[in-house]
Amino acid sequence: MTGKTFPDLRSRLAARSPRRVSPSVGQREAAVALILGPDDGGAGHILFIKRAEFTGDPWSGQIAFPGGRRDPADPDLQHTAMREALEETGISLAPDTLAGALDDLSPVSPHLPQIIVRPFVFELEGLPPVKPSAEVALHLWVSRDVLQSSRTSETLLLLGQPRLVSGYRVGPHFIWGMTERILTPLLDLLDQR
């Protein structure tokens, strides 16, 4: 496995009790896959996608993790994350690559869909080829070192108003919003000594 890349991640994830939220009336469930792989320097990489631009999609064009809404045929949210990763990136995630899960979370803006997202973390032995679907404009394998050094805040125009938001600046891409709220706790876990 990727022992030298993320040596204690599985045990750190297993030692915590992730916060779980039951959907209320009108809320949908979704899941995302945080796909981690090694690199030559041992710091590791995390896969991100840029969502294709679609009218009516509130996350259109944003940097995200592969994922989406739970299908009625999905037996559980882990299956949702694995199915969505395969559909969006062509990466087939085996159950034994699951390292654990992070806290459930929802959008903080009332202007976004009422959804509960469960992030699942997967560790791979290598960086598989990515075959993006039409829902994905591009993909990025970003090293943990780059992410740790790129944390910043930027002012974005949201609903016509300037707002200072936390995120990660990776070249021309800004990772913010729910993706930042999922990524930061993972990086904190990876940095624990």
Image (cartoon, rainbow, N blue to C red):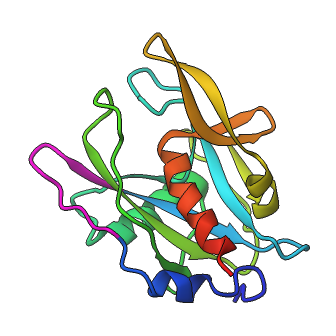
> Which residue is depicted at the point 78% across and 74% down?
38
Across and down, in percent, residue 78 comes to: 38, 71
Q: Nearer the viewer, residue 96 or 64?
A: 64
Q: Is residue 134 left or right of residue 146?
A: left
> Which residue is depicted at the point 36% across and 41% down?
107
Q: Specify the principal SS of the magenta part.
A: loop
- Rendering quarter of residue 184: bottom right
In what quadrant of the picture does the C terminus appear? bottom right
Q: Is residue 44 left or right of residue 77?
A: right
The furthest residue to the right: 40
Q: Nearer the viewer, residue 135 or 123?
A: 123
Q: Is residue 174 visible in this depiction of the protein?
A: yes
Vertical arrangement, residue 63 with respect to residue 86, above or below:
above
Q: Is residue 66 left or right of residue 152?
A: left
Q: Nearer the viewer, residue 142 or 85?
A: 142
Q: Nearer the viewer, residue 177 or 132?
A: 177
**Magenta residues, start to end:** 19-30
Q: Is residue 147 left or right of residue 79?
A: right
Residue 7 is one of the magenta-drawn residues:
no
Q: Is residue 52 visible in this depiction of the protein?
A: no
> Which residue is depicted at the point 42% across and 81% down?
16
